[in-house]
Amino acid sequence: MDTTKYKSVTIGIGTWKKLNELASKDLRSVSRTIEYLVHEHDYLTKKYMEGNSTLTPEAYFKSQEKANG
């Protein structure tokens, strides 16, 4: 593996199970799901900081969690 392009991370099994479930729903790998979540968080943070959203990224994700059960 090219360590200048990829890194390994350790996460708890509970978090991995959630990531795996999200990945399965969206037909993504766990690594692609992590990439998606990081990019989505960056986008929402930028939107919030520019004043285009009243929700912080954390509040947005919590509202999505509640909506999706």
Image (cartoon, helix red, strand yellow):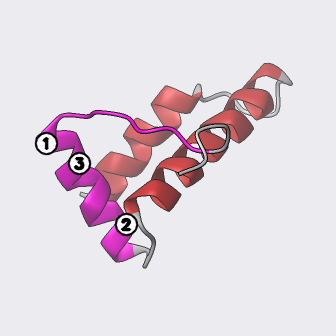
Tell me which residue sits at (66%, 44%) in the image: 5
Q: Do the residues labelled 1 and 3 touch (CB within 8 Å)?
A: yes
* Comes first in the chain, label 2 or label 3: 3
Check disc 2 and report the residue beneath it.
Answer: 23
Check disc 1 and report its element: helix, strand or loop. helix
How far apart are labels 2 and 3 at the CA level? 10 Å
Horizontal side of 26 relative to 14 (left or right) equals right
Check disc 3 and report its element: helix, strand or loop. helix
Horizontal side of 41 relative to 24 (left or right) equals right
> Which of the labelled discs sits on residue 1, or is there none?
none
Give percent across and percent down for residue 37: 53, 47
Say if the magenta span includes residue 23: yes
Give percent across and percent down for residue 64: 42, 50
Neighbor class of circle 3 (other Cα within 10 Å; few <14, some 14-19, many 20+) is few
Q: Are marks 2 and 3 in contact (CB under 8 Å)?
A: no
Range covered by the magenta-colored residues: 6-25
Neighbor class of circle 1 (other Cα within 10 Å; few <14, some 14-19, many 20+) is few
Give percent across and percent down for residue 49: 78, 20
Check disc 3 and report the residue beneath it.
Answer: 16
Check disc 2 and report its element: helix, strand or loop. helix
| Foreground residue among 22 and 44 | 22
Which amino acid is tagged 3?
A: Trp
Say if the magenta span includes residue 46: no
Check disc 1 and report the residue beneath it.
Answer: 13
How far apart are labels 1 and 3 at the CA level? 5 Å
* Comes first in the chain, label 1 or label 2: 1
Tell me which residue sits at (67%, 27%) in the image: 54
